[in-house]
Image: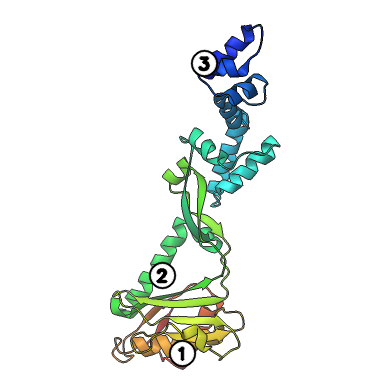
Amino acid sequence: MAAIDKALEFLKTSGSINYAATAKKFECDETTLRRRHQGKQRARRDADSLYKSRLSKQQEQDLVTYIRKLSLRGIPPTLSMIRNFAQDIAKIEVGKNWPYSFVQRHRNEIDCTWFDGFDIARRRADNASRYRAYFDLIREKIDKYDILPQNTYNMDEKGFLLGVINRTKRVFDVNAKRQGKLLGASQDGNRSWITFLACICQDMTSLPPFLIYQGKPGQVQDTWLTDFDPEHQSAFFSTSETGWTSHELGKEWLIGVFDRFTKAKARNGRDYRLLITDGHSSHQGCRQINQIRLGRKSELN
């Protein structure tokens, strides 16, 4: 029995209460003894027990079940969301560390780790049948036009929205992760402010990047290029009202970057080149320029 507990037992049977003398006798803190005896302070084990039992066992299990559902939908909750859920259930405030304790108590069912953002559109497209159809189409084009690896390219864009944090700590269902059903944390896939267009080749080479800033069309500001060294670096810059890609910018990239930097490897355009893009409208708009300006020896998909 701890010294403070012995002192409290002594006070229960003592005819008179003398906190100073009792604290000295049992070698404990007088203030703590007084507050414990007067009911103003709980024992740490009692306080911890109360803290941990903000939710009943059934309520905690219901919360685990809800986390499992969110995980399977691709939106595992953050720790702050877990805290909000608990407060909504218990109708009382829980401490900021409660979610960590909750995860530890249910470690066999849920866990917590860092997740990168996962675009909603990508999550919806993530299934085996679509993967098979995609690679079947790629193989068909390669075989049909005898396309070499050095002439096979993949282009994509990434929008940087200022103030968005893409990496967050999430709580997820353990079984969902083991079964490969946990894809990541969904986020809005909108592209804005600054857009980065990148293109890589199957032979591990890459084309110069193409950056689109938000501004009036054709007015690239010098302040945006202060860290750019044209003598040792290669990149292209443009603008749009939104900072997004457009049909015109897609054509600009296709002619000024893609054709310019890939024609030589394709025997000056005599060999077919395969350019793989996503379904973004600005990329689809490149199809017409494919026939008009690049000639028949290109295949755009």
At label 3, the amino acid type is Phe
In percent of the image, x 45 and y 46: which residue is there? Answer: 177
Q: Is residue 187 above or below residue 98?
A: below
**Left or right, 113 with reference to 99:** left
Mark 1 closeness class: few <14, some 14–19, many ≥20 residues within 10 Å: some
Mark 2 closeness class: few <14, some 14–19, many ≥20 residues within 10 Å: few
Q: CA distance from mark 1 to mark 3?
A: 94 Å
Q: CA distance from mark 2 to mark 1?
A: 20 Å
**Left or right, 157 with reference to 188:** left
Q: Which residue is mark 1?
A: 291
Q: CA distance from mark 2 to mark 3?
A: 82 Å
The answer to which quarter of the image holds residue 88 is top right
Residue 138 marker: none
Q: Which residue is mark 2?
A: 137
Q: Earlier in the sequence, mark 2 or mark 1?
A: 2
Q: Is residue 18 above or below residue 42?
A: above
Residue 106 can be seen in this image: no
In percent of the image, x 54 and y 49: which residue is there? Answer: 76
Determine the secondary structure under disc 1: helix
Residue 26 marker: 3
Residue 154 can be seen in this image: yes
Q: Nearer the observer, disc 2 or disc 3?
A: 3
At label 1, the amino acid type is Gln
